Image (cartoon, helix red, strand yellow):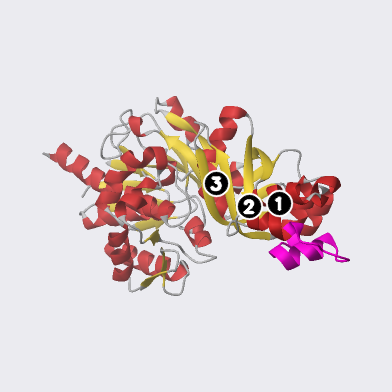
Amino acid sequence: MKRVAIVGGGPAGLMAAESLVCGGTQVDVYDAMPSVGRKFLLAGVGGLNLTHAEAFDAFVSRYGARAGLIRPLLEGFPPDALRAWVHGLGIDTFVGSSGRVFPTGMKAAPLLRAWLHRLRKAGVRIHVRHRWAGGDETGALRFTTPTGECVVGADATVLALGGASWPKLGSDGAWVPWLTARGVELAPLQPSNCGFDVAGGWSEHLRAAFAGQPLKTVGLRFADAAGAVRERRGELMLSDTGIEGGLVYALSAPLREAIAARGAVTVELDLLPDRTPARVLAEVSHPRGARSLSSHLQSRTGIKGAKMALLREVLTPDEIKAPATLARAIKSLPLTLAAPRPIAEAISSAGGVRFEALDAQLMLRALPGVFCAGEMLDWDAPTGGYLLTACFASGRAAGQGVLDYLRARSS
C-alpha cells in the first residue's frame, strides 16, 4: 500500500487525508500543535461560517485576481457539495440572512469531532507535536518532536501548512525559506482580512473611550491602486490604532494594495448612508436653541457615541460648528490609513506558493511528488465562507492529484 504524508492538520490537510484514504492509500497526518484543527476551532468561536449560498459565478468572483485559478478547484468541490459533505457527518446547516452558511449549533467543535472520528475509523493516523523541519537529501521528511527528531519516508507528500496569520495556532510561515531554497516561486506573505492603522494614530481620548466601539451602517469609499473607486456598506469598529471589522475586512486586499502603491490611502466614511446630502444638511442646519451640538445631532440625525467622537477627532472646533462643513463630513469623513496591522493579528494571509509553481493538480513543479493546499497557496478572499471553502476544495484537489500521481507511477 502506498503511503502519503500530510503536513498540517487544518481543513485543507484533513480534506486531503479523506480523499486519499478513500482512494486506498495509507495516510499519516502530522501537525506541530498538541491537537489538529486549532485555527478551524477558532474560526468557529463566533459562529462557524462554512461557505456562502450565493450564485456560483458571484462566489468565484470574491477571489479577485486569483478567481480564474481558484475556479477549477471550486468546480471540483463547490459550496453545495461542501454542505452535502457536512450533512454526511450528521450535522445540518442553515443559510443566514446574509447568505452565509453555518452548521446548526454554529460551532466548529462538533463538526471536527465527527470528522476526526470518521478519518480515524477509515485508517488515517494522526501524529501531533510533530513540527515539520523540511526534508533530507533522499526526499524523506524530518520532524522535531518532544522526544527528538524523526525521519519519515512517503511515496508522496501534501503540504498544508497554512499561511502566517495566528502563528500561535501553528500557521507561522516557517516553510517559506525551505521552499524558496528549492526554487519554488513564492509571493510574499501579507496580512489579509485585517485592520488598518490611521496615520498619526488616534488621540488618547478617542483611544481610551471608544476603542472597540462599533460604527454601525456606514459606507466606505476610496480609490484603489488602479484608481477605480471602491465603495461598500457595512459595519466597522474603532480599534486602538485605527479601524477594523467586517466592512474593513471585505476591502482589505484593495486597501492593502493601494497603500503599497501610494504609501497611504485616504478613505471616506459616510456616517449616514441612508440619507441624502441635502437631507443631512437640512437636519444639521435646523435651529438647535439651547441644546448642545451633541444633543442636537443625536436628535436630528441619530449620530452619537463613536460616530460623534470620530467627527470631533477629524474636524476642528470651528469646522464642527459650521453646518455645511459638518454635513459634508457626515457624508464623507476622510481618514488616512497608513498601514495594515501585522500579519500575526490578521484573520488570514495573502501570498504564498504561486500557482505558476504548481501543475494543474497542485504538485510543485520543482519537487515532484510534493503537493500544496490551503492557505499556503497564493490566493486571497474575504471572510464570509470563502476562505474555508477554498481550503476544503484545494485539499480535496491535492488529494486527488496525489492519487493520480501514484497511479501514473505504478502503471
Secondary structure of the residue carrying tag 1 is helix
The residue shown at (43%, 69%) is: 96
Image side of residue 168 versus residue 52, left or right: right
Rendered location of residue 254, percent (x, y) = 51, 39
Which of the two residues, 309 or 96, is positioned nearer the viewer here? 309
Q: State whether residue 307 is above or below residue 149.
A: below
- Mark 2: amino acid: Pro
Q: Is residue 46 above or below residue 145?
A: below
Q: Is residue 369 above or below residue 297?
A: above
Residue corresponding to mark 2 = 277
Return the residue found at the far right. Answer: 290
- For the record, the magenta segment spans 284-306
Q: Secondary structure at mark 2?
A: helix
User: Residues at badges 2 and 1 in contact (C-beta under 8 Å)?
Assistant: yes
Distance, label 1 to label 3, CA atoms, is 40 Å
Question: Can I make out residue 173 in this image?
Answer: no
Residue drawn where x is 82% and y is 51% of the image? 321
Q: Which residue is mark 1?
A: 327
Cα–Cα gap, marks 2 and 1: 7 Å
Kind of residue at disc 3: Ser
